[in-house]
Amino acid sequence: MKAAVSRFEEIKKRFSVDTEITYSFPAPGLPDSPEFGIFEDEFEIEERIILDIFEHVTGKVVKIIEDQVTQMMKNKRTKRITGIVLRGGFSESRYLQKKLQKYAEALGGNIQILKPSHK
């Protein structure tokens, strides 16, 4: 299970919907089941399923940010937004970064998507 979680963390960072691929996750001990994509101790998931997961999660993140921006503008705490700071493991997701960049561009101005560097 630990290896599967590690593999998902790896995919999460670089996922960007550029190709149609099938992702493999370690699944030692599970019996082969073509119906569920389990072959020779690996569980396979198509990109479209990963995309559904990412759409669900990134949609929630964007909504939270939209709500925060709306509140800041409504309460006149700021006249303009200059940056959106991301934290946590999902901040490394290229997919999330691209989605937030589109949102920032729609707001207008020069809004930077800022994320900590993880080394």
Image (cartoon, rainbow, N blue to C red):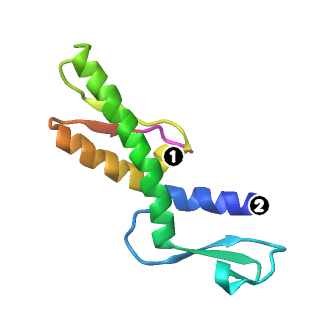
Who's the residue at 50% across and 58% down the image? Answer: 53
Tag 1: residue type?
Phe
What label sits on residue 16 in the rendered view? none
**To which residue does mark 2 refer?**
1
Image location of residue 11, percent across then percent down: 54, 62
Residue 45 visible in image: yes
| 3 falls in the magenta region | no
Give the residues in magenta.
115-119
Mark 2 crowd level (few <14, some 14–19, many ≥20, 10 Å Cα)? few
Image location of residue 10, percent across then percent down: 58, 59
| Disc 1, SS | helix
Q: Is residue 97 above or below residue 46?
A: above
Residue sticking out furthest to the front: 35
| 117 falls in the magenta region | yes
Image location of residue 30, percent across then percent down: 80, 75
Q: Is residue 110 left or right of residue 23?
A: left
Who's the residue at 40% across and 56% down the image? Answer: 95
Q: Quadrant of residue 114 in the image?
A: top left
Q: Nearer the viewer, residue 49 or 87?
A: 49
Quadrant location, the C terminus: top right
Tag 2: residue type?
Met
Sequence-wise, the earlier of marks 1 and 2 is 2
Q: Is residue 3 left or right of residue 105?
A: right
**To which residue does mark 1 refer?**
90
Q: Is residue 8 above or below residue 36?
A: above
Quadrant location, the N terminus: bottom right
